[in-house]
Amino acid sequence: MLPELLLGMPVEIRHVTAEDMPRARRFYADRQYGGGICPADSVLLAEHEGKLVGIVRLAPEEGTVVLRGMQIHPAFRRQGIGMRLLAEIARTLGTQSCYCIPYAYLANFYRRIEFVGIDPAEAPFFLRSRLAGYQQRGDGKEYLLMRRKKSPGVP
């Protein structure tokens, strides 16, 4: 059976509210995402008929911003929800720079909002350490460090 979204059902993208937090945390837990949500994070949700189908967060960490935790419910993948969340991330970031550590096969996805692969030596130490930890998991996945620079002319 095809997910309802394929039949043209709408998906709403919005910022999380305090009331949404338990549901957002459950969604992450259901996907076995261990990054959690911190109070300072800017969290975006994708909802279909009131059901949470996607989530992503911008986490301020050590003087920089890191895009983390992009998760789409398996039944709703490959339907543009991730792209819509990514577009809203780009609007939220504006001219602000940002880092992310995606699976390498998703590099083109993140390039759509001007993320580029960088040498780990160009990143803050905490991100180099996080990348090394991901690479040592032994999960057979390749990870990439990416950065979205500030817009030209912005201090």
Image (spheres, rainbow, N blue to C red):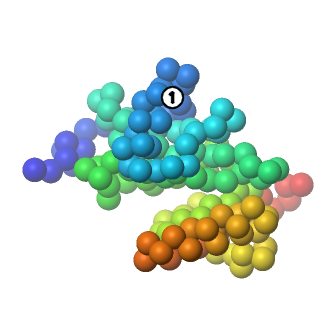
Q: Please give the name of the residue rendered at 44% of the width and 72% of the height, measured from the top-left corner.
A: 139
Camera sees residue 134: yes
Q: Please give the name of the residue rendered at 68% of the width and 60% of the height, measured from the top-left corner.
A: 99
- Whether 19 is drawn above or below 87: the answer is above
- Whether 126 is drawn above or below 40: the answer is below
| Residue 100 picture location, percent across and down | 62, 61
Q: Quadrant of residue 136?
A: bottom right
The quarter of the picture where the C terminus appears is: bottom right
Q: Horizontally, is 134 left or right of 20 in the view?
A: right
Q: Horizontally, is 122 left or right of 52 in the view?
A: right
Residue projecting furthest to the left = 1
Residue projecting furthest to the right = 155
| Residue 9 picture location, percent across and down | 25, 38
| Residue 44 picture location, percent across and down | 52, 39
> Identity of the amino acid at label 1?
Met
Q: Please give the name of the residue rendered at 37% of the width and 54% of the height, measured from the top-left corner.
A: 80
| Residue 97 picture location, percent across and down | 74, 56
Number of marks present in the image shown: 1
Residue that label 1 marks: 21
In the foreground, 115 or 130: 130
Q: Quadrant of residue 141?
A: bottom left
- Whether 37 is drawn above or below 93: the answer is above
- Whether 147 is drawn above or below 94: the answer is below
Label 1: which secondary element:
helix
